Amino acid sequence: MHDLEPFYAWRNLYIASEDLRSPFYGREYSEFEFSHAVYNYLIHPQWDEMGSATLFIKILYADYDQGYCFIEMIGEWNDCLYNDIMYLKRNIIEPLIENGINKFILIGENVLNFHSSDDCYYQEWFDELEDGWIVALNFRDFVIREFESANIDYYIAFGKHFNDVSWRKFTPMDLFKVIEGAMMRRLDPHFD
């Protein structure tokens, strides 16, 4: 797992540690010192710790004018034992919402498992977005099934439009347009 780096091709456009409005502003990284682990496997030091013992993230891109951000994730999403959604919501999402972000794209290819608790933080997050939304991109099928069985799919959009997106070939602006278009079609079947 230590070889799995956060996606870095957009670093010429955005770096969270250099963004004054980012929860990770000013954070310094080591390329050589591995200090975080998931399942006793060290993870690459470029992943950001957000308070959870098992889930790590990287804000890949944020556009405050358009109100969206991409967050890549790695690890085990465990609300049952570690209340990961609370850490994500309080430490990351709330500061981003305060700065105008209301559309969240979560990239979950490296989320290995999900354990649910209640849906209170998901509902709170969704309710605070007004005209925004939350999309889960490329999560594993069994993780999506766990989200669905916990009724998280009321708050986060999953599905055929978001399961197999070759997102790395896009710029963040173009990828946002693709996802926004899919969300518009999902919310309004008459949208063209």
Image (cartoon, helix red, strand yellow):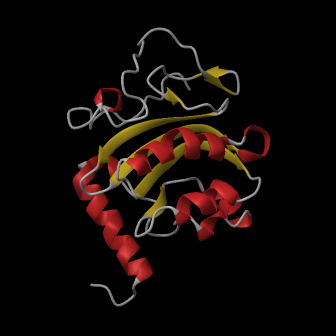
From the viewer's side, name the closer residue of 43 and 106. 106
- Does residue 48 appear left or right of residue 173 in this picture? right
Query: Can residue 156 be seen in the rendering of this structure?
Result: no
56 above or below 161? above
Q: Position of residue 38 (x, y in %)?
A: 65, 28
Quarter placement of the C terminus = bottom left
8 above or below 158? above
| Residue for point 39% across, 87% down | 189
- Does residue 22 appear left or right of residue 172 in this picture? right
Residue 133: quadrant of the picture:
bottom left
Query: Can residue 2 be seen in the rendering of this structure?
Result: yes
| Residue for point 35% across, 53% down | 100
From the viewer's side, name the closer residue of 185 and 103. 103
Q: Position of residue 11 (x, y in %)?
A: 26, 32
Quarter placement of the N terminus = top right
Q: Position of residue 45 (x, y in %)?
A: 48, 19
From the viewer's side, name the closer residue of 43 and 20. 20
| Residue for point 40% across, 21% down | 27
165 above or below 182? above
The extreme left residue here reads 12
The extreme top residue here reads 32
| Residue for point 66% across, 60% down | 147
